[in-house]
Image: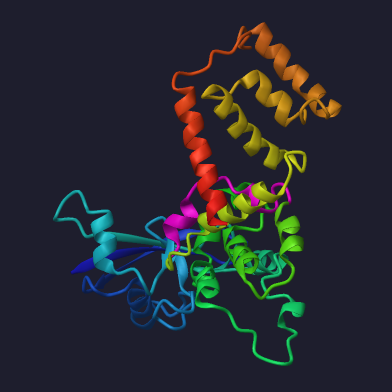
Amino acid sequence: MKVLFKVTRQQQNTKARVQTYTLEVESGNTILDCLNRIKWELDGSLAFRKNCRNTICGSCGMKINGRSALACKENVGREIARFPSPSTKEIPEITIAPLGNMPAIKDLVVDMTSFWNHLEAVDPYVSTRGRAIPEREFLQTPQERTQLDRAGNCILCGACYSECNARAVNSDFVGPHALAKAQRMVADARDTETEARLEAYNQETQGVWGCTRCYLCNAVCPMEVAPMDRIGEIKQQLLQEKDAGENRSIRHRKVLVELVKEGGWIDERKFGVMVVGNYLRDLKGLLSLAPLGLRMLAKGKFPLKFEPSEGVEEARSLIEAIQRYNSHCE
């Protein structure tokens, strides 16, 4: 069958353009097979990364029909099925573009410097002290090793980083790939720097609290690492070990649970005072709420009283059951 490939072409720091190529292909051909044919048969100037062709190296990450994926994993048949042509007479189209959140060098090749720098920032190596055991090999039990399975599957393809909404608006956020690797270090029984790692990952919007929980990293990960879930595991450990006074992010989550247990939903009057004002201990935070509070009062949007929701006891029992379960699983 004939397929029209719309490929983004560009040089570094220049405006991108779309170039089209028509190929006769089979539905089982991978997108990488098709790109190879375009380069070998139609246009030798097309640039893209590739290596293993077997979903191992992560080199061929790119945007295929708008989502970040590996060109060696996705095939023509599946892509056409995702976006079928309105008419059977039309030639099916597949769009191919470079990964997001990283500047293009040429065509589908991006500069991954920020990707690697952010990975390095979480120190993704078992600590030196953890490796310094000259008498014998450092053995792990099967149960300990199982804790590393999901995060250990990451092949650093860049798909999650490309899709990350938090990274798009906050250049300090280290990204889901780095935090998935960070969770692996926290869970690794051989590592001796867990406390220091958690302190580093507890940074406001640079660490785990920068994640907006959009789930896109989970949706595109070709290895089912589920980076957002790994970030959630670090958050959960921080919430268990840190006091609400540590920082606003931890306080935000603890106060939310506390107020829902109390009233079934959030008492907005208390929420701002407790989170931003740190339970009346942060005068600067309290003063920062004044302009918003005055505007709400002027527009009649400030709740003067709080009405608990129905089923408060049921909501409280559910939260407490989850808390007991999490405590039992530690």
Front residue of this view, candidates 320 and 107: 320
User: Which residue lies at the image location 73% right of the left edge and 24% below the top edge?
Assistant: 273
Q: What stretch is highlighted in magenta?
A: 203-221
- When the figure is inspected, residue 167 is found, relative to residue 183, above or below; the finding is above
- The answer to whether residue 164 of the structure is visible from this angle is no
51 with respect to 199 (left or right): left
Indicate whether residue 11 is drawn in magenta.
no
Q: Where is 132 relative to 14, above or below?
A: below
Query: Can you see residue 126?
Result: yes
**Horizontal and vertical percent for residue 219?**
42, 55
Residue that extends furthest to the left in the rendered view of this protein:
88
Q: In this view, does 233 lie above or below 33?
A: above
Depth check, front residue: 91 or 97: 97
User: In which quadrant of the rendered image does the N terminus lie?
Assistant: bottom left
Residue depicted at 69% across the width and 13% down the height: 295
- Identify the image's colour scheme: rainbow, by chain, secondary structure or one colour: rainbow
Using residue 29 as the reference point, say whether residue 256 is left or right of it. right
Residue 126: x %, y % from top left = 68, 75
Q: Which of 273 and 215 is in front in this view?
A: 273
- Please provide percent x and percent y for residue 108: 49, 68
Residue 288, image quadrant = top right
